[in-house]
Amino acid sequence: MTDTLARAFELLDQGDRGGAIAILYQATEQGAGGEIAGLLAELRAEAGEHEQAVALFTRALADDPGHGPWRRARLSSLMQLPARREEAQRFCAEILAQRGDDPTAHRHMARLCLEAGKIEAAVSHAREAIFLAPHDLESLGDIADILTTAGEPLPAVEALAVALAQAHPADPALPFAAVAQARGWLALAEPAKAATSLRRALELDPGDSAGAQGLLDQLEAADAPADLPATFVRALFDTYADRFDRELVGRLHYDAPAALRAVLDEQGIAGGRDVLDAGCGTGLAGLAVRDMARRLAGFDLSPRMVEKARARDIYHELWVGELVESLTQRPASADLLLAADVLVYLGDLRPVMAAAATVLRPGGLFAFTCERVDQPDGFLLHEGRRFAHAEAHVRQALAQAGFSILTLCHHSTRIDRGQPVPGLICLAQQA
């Protein structure tokens, strides 16, 4: 066996891979396992022949079950075989049961969980893989794609930012990692940053093996978005949660909850209602109307915001959810719907108005604020990454959803750069 290995390595050093593989195969046919089977498995995996590689790694591991590199390599080859996903998951779980600090196993388990729809588990394993191998650029590119697909692009771009800054320009994984970073930036509604990452990938690899040019072409041809991605909004408010009340109320003089309550009082709206606080944030709007509520429920896209709202102990029910989906899934469940500073993250308001009509009972009320743009119709995404809406667009969207307007007036809910932000405040009633 020693002579066979020595001759195989000699042939490999001479560039004769075919000759090395031939003598290794001859040895395995004569019953050799261990290092001979392991080396041959590595060569088969490098050639993309993963079925053979798995069989050979299995044979090698029969002689040395605790050989970590072979175990990881066998798992990596299994991951290339879609028909063997269940086997891959069992083997991955076996590795983690023995070595919970194996970053490769955590990365592959993250992918397997994502494919199985187990999003929380996928994110957990991906984060652990980053913690265990924060500088492995090839691994981080794959983990970033997993996190972005799972709706968590912020930790993806954060992990890659550090690794890319420290990477050697000749690292072959760098262009692929830069493209993965671009996908994360796109999910965070940062097209300029995405374009920078894609151009870097092209500079490093003019042959574009990572597929940067196609993404860049799509990005440059894209129209302005009709809505901001949910991943951007969630990441924004997850990051902002701990200082939200202090920044918004203290520095920006935010008054949307108080203004909505004032409109309700001016219209003589009585209490004893089932109230739904959409995009509840830390619960400021809930505080403003809790004495009107027979039952107060709320939801937000940001899990950390929901945690802050739950700590106020004023809601009967709270959950993490997307705006339109959460409204349409609970038909005729509310008498009063609030949306304080929520519609600024949506462009076209027609879908959310239709969803609002769905969640409200007949005669139900929708009280909301939005930012205002002085143009004939439509909406505008301004540099603050928030949408401003023409009054005509708001009126049209409400009318199409079957609402009648009780009040719609100009009102600024916050200060930006020392100036009031033009806005609208509205109370509408379902027919």
Image (cartoon, rainbow, N blue to C red):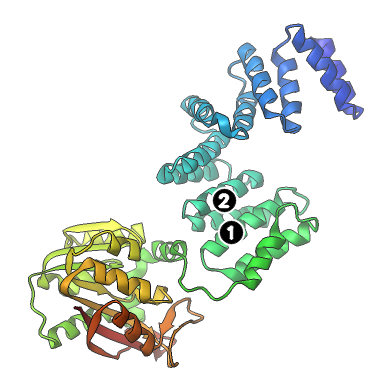
Q: Position of residue 240 (x, y in %)?
A: 39, 66
At label 2, which amino acid type do we have?
Answer: Asp
Determine the image quadrant of residue 31. top right
Residue 138 pos. (x, y %): 66, 45
| Helix, strand or loop under label 1 | helix
Quarter of the image with the N terminus is top right
183 sits to left or right of 248: right
Q: Position of residue 202 (x, y in %)?
A: 75, 61
Extreme residue in the right direction = 14
Q: Nearer the viewer, residue 47 or 71?
A: 47
Res 331 quadrant in image: bottom left
Q: Determine whether label 2 and label 1 are within 8 Å by CB.
A: yes
Residue in view at x 73 percent, y 9 percent: 32
Q: Residue furthest top?
A: 30
The label shown at residue 183 is 1
Residue 376 higher or lower than 219, as above or below: below
422 vs 61: above or below: below
Q: Horizontal and vertical percent for residue 218?
A: 64, 66
Vertical relation: 305 (above or below) 124: below
| For marks 2 and 1 on the same chain, the one whose residue lies earlier in the sequence | 2
Identity of the amino acid at label 1?
Arg
